[in-house]
Amino acid sequence: MKKLIKLFTLILLVPVTMQAQDLADALRYSSVQVQGTARAGAMGNAFGALGGDFTSVSINPAGLGLYRAGELTLTPAFSSISVESNYLGNMMSENLYKFSLNNLSYVAAIQTQDRSESGLVNFNIGIGYNRLKDFNSEMIARTGSANGSFLDYVSSYANQFGFNPDGNNSYTSEFYEQLAWDTDLLLREDDTGTYWHDLEDAGYGQRQRKSISRDGSVDEYSLAMGLNFNHKLYLGASLGITDVFYRESSRLVEEDGNNSIPFFNDMVFDSYLRTSGTGYNGKIGIIFKPTQQIRLGASVHTPTFYNLQDIFETSMSSSVDYDDGTSETYDATSPWDEYDYDLETPLRATLSGAFVIAKSGLISIDYEYVDYGSTSLRRGGDGYDFVDENEEITEAYRSVGNLRVGGELKVTDGLSLRAGYENYPSAYNSQAFEVSQPNSDAGLSVYSAGLGYRNAGFFFDVAYRYSIQQNNDLLYPEPVTANYPTPEMAQFDTVKNKVLFTLGFKF
């Protein structure tokens, strides 16, 4: 059955994932940052107490109650993603450009029959779409002289847990040890039955390169309602349906560029993972205006209940020399594996406040609490209960407080300037499983600015968002026994530049 195998997976350092549902899946689909309209994006998405923007439906649906007129919005976006790597002192960079649709929404503002300005003033309904997360990136890391190999993991695992080339093996062997055996990279001593490989005998020194391509998104489709009581109290609720698509392709290349490793010429290991599925959640919220200048908000999001399917495949090729002077090339491919399972993300709670400065501007702040350690994998397609994995999630992850701050200044009646900042701390505990987690400081910071123009029934907003994040990852899994060198981590610095445009109509 699919389980986490070693500590390297537990601390989430490996882009080459084992074929299992694990901590990486739990965090990948639980850690989201709403990305809606350009106005909200320019103001750090700090809209929990502001409302009047469809982005608020994904934060605090009570914000829907602040609409006094109907609205239709469309928000396309253009992104530039740059990833710079540092692996054993070698610097590399990759760039990716992507077009996306961040938001599409419609709001109907319905006044009461007597058009009263007291009691229930408005009953508003909204339907639309906000993007919650982008997975898109390209990255590459390499070195001209490696001090370890992916084959260290393969041979150590074969020795530690047993491997029979003729069958009756563990679930994961089809994707790793069997491929290495079929491509004549995993070798065995006839007398002892010990597995080994040519690179360890030669002391390594081979060229090594890892490339990773990721794409996909988490999108939320919401149906929401908001109530306006006396222009002081606003209540809201929403039902969200989330759509997940994630695809990761990686290639690890090792080659003897200096002809210093007997028999071994090169190896290529390819891994492909695709995850798709849907989920649902509910949100309730409240906004209260004790004065015309102050707005206070609070909201609670239920967990998102996902039903997901993983499709996984690996392949390996090699070129080897033999004592008789001949050379051979080999290719092997794993089975195409599909697996269904459920995932429950953490509950979220947000407290918000905003101060409106007459009619000249405003300042807003959101504090969002999320306990990533409460994420749970559920109901594997073959009846697996994920008890061990969920205990590991609880130990590896912590609760965090996400911060969003934004401001707006009205330059004229029609023109506004905006700015914002967002901070999303790392979900990793500093210590887990009796070791330090290197990504415990791998938080995400977002700086934003923009402007907007409004004229009667039409408005146009533009925003620029700059985000930075640093992660440490292994290029290949850590060997499961101590007789192999510990692999070095690569550092990946990701910078995203994103421009959003919102075109909107009031009616």
Image (cartoon, rainbow, N blue to C red):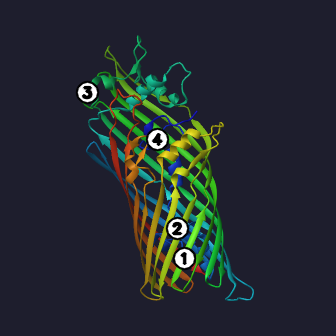
Residue identifier under label 2: 36
Verify CB contact (< 8 Å) between mark 1 and mark 4: no
Query: Which residue is depicted at the point 29% across and 32% down?
Result: 206
Element type at mark 2: loop
Front position among marks 3 and 1: 1
Query: Which residue is depicted at the point 54% across and 71% down?
Result: 48
Q: How far apart are marks 4 and 3 (CA)?
A: 36 Å
Residue 98 higher or lower than 416, as above or below: above
Q: Residues within 10 Å of mark 3 (few under 14, many from 20)?
A: few
Of the pair 309 and 138, the residue shown nearer to us: 309
Residue identifier under label 3: 259
Of callouts 2 and 3, the N-terminal one: 2
Element type at mark 4: helix
Q: What residue type is labelled 1?
A: Leu
Query: Which residue is depicted at the point 41% across and 36% down?
Result: 477
Tell me the tag on residue 296: 1
Q: How far apart are marks 1 and 2 (CA)?
A: 21 Å
Write down the quadrant of residue 381 in the picture.
top right
Q: Which amino acid does label 4 sit on?
A: Leu
Element type at mark 1: strand
Taking the image as shown, residue 297 lies to the left or right of residue 429, namely right
Residue 368 higher or lower than 382, as above or below: below
Q: What residue type is labelled 2?
A: Gly
Of the pair 422 and 290, the residue shown nearer to us: 290
Residue 458 place in picture, x, y as percent: 54, 82
Verify CB contact (< 8 Å) between mark 3 and mark 1: no
Residue identifier under label 4: 10
Q: In which quarter of the image is the C terminus?
A: bottom right
Front position among marks 2 and 4: 4
Front position among marks 2 and 3: 2
Of the pair 321 and 190, the residue shown nearer to us: 190
